[in-house]
Image (cartoon, grey):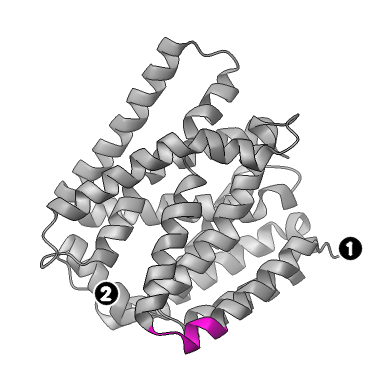
Amino acid sequence: MVKINHFDILKILITLICTGLGAVLPDGILSFLAAVNVLTIGIIHGANDLYIASKIKRTVSKHQFRYLFGIYILFVFVMVFALYSFPLASLLLFVIISSFHFGEQQWYQKTIVKSVKLYIFYAAFGFFLFALLFYTHKLHTANIIFEITQQQVPNFFFDRFIIFASTLLTFLLLINFKQIKSQLFIQTIGLLSLLFLFSQTSLIWSFSVYFVLWHSLPSLKDQASVLYPYDSSPIRSYITSAIPYWLLSLIGFTVAVLFVDNETISMTSLFFAFLAAITIPHVIAIFLMHKKYIS
């Protein structure tokens, strides 16, 4: 039986509208809108990770909360150090971890029996999304990789990447077919709408639409339902509690912008490096939340 919910249809329709906007609006306006979307909704959806961790542990004292905060900040600084010292390996790690995270968010509630092969499918799905995004923006992606890692990526790499990701996803789709067959139709339509978006609009606009509409908003809704299950307005409560940590993230990004030489690295590259630095602790928190509270 094919399962389709209204939000899936809405995401597809908004994606098509955003594709149209991406085709007619100037690049400067699109880049500004993309940055605003990611730095607001995108960052806010990960700003309550400490409260998620506290919820998982059930009882956390102020001392323990400060300890969690310290661990979280340590993760961020370790990732910043890794990006500076081992940029290529760190960027690859970011893509792999983010692949699992994106696939998990999109499929977790749509699959019943969780297993290792299903978790690998989540990663393969996210990996394919990255491959699709990179393949449709080869030059811009190669420039960003070069600015972050100082490694030149040839065009044929993206061709091989999309072939490998497609093959891997197909193989894991067949292995997990019974688990995901009810969602294949709507997910395929969603992928086609994203392919249309990616192929017709810029890298930064394409990524922002996917990241905010397809990932951040559904994740924010899930987190709000876990943190504030009895609240009359869980989304509002979620945003209120997230604001201090969101502002802290923006301050960190602003400091990076002020101190990084923009002749060496572009704002877009810095933008993606910033996301990479805050990804790992967020992915861990959401994975544990899914395992404990969301089926």
| Numbered-mark total | 2
Q: Main secondary structure of the magenta part?
A: helix
The residue stretch that appears in magenta: 20-26
Quarter assignment of residue 287: top right
Q: Is residue 175 left or right of residue 151?
A: right
The quadrant in which the C terminus is found is top right
Farthest bottom residue in view: 24
Quarter assignment of residue 59: top right
Is 23 included in the stretch rendered in magenta? yes
Quarter assignment of residue 271: bottom left
The residue under label 1 is which amino acid type? Met
- For mark 2, what is the residue? 142
The residue under label 2 is which amino acid type? Ala
Q: What x and y, as percent, mark residue 195?
A: 55, 79
- The one of 194 and 262 positioned closer to us in this rendering: 262
- The one of 66 and 89 positioned closer to us in this rendering: 66
Counting residues from the start of the chain, the first of labels 2 and 1 encountered is 1
Q: Is residue 164 visible?
A: no
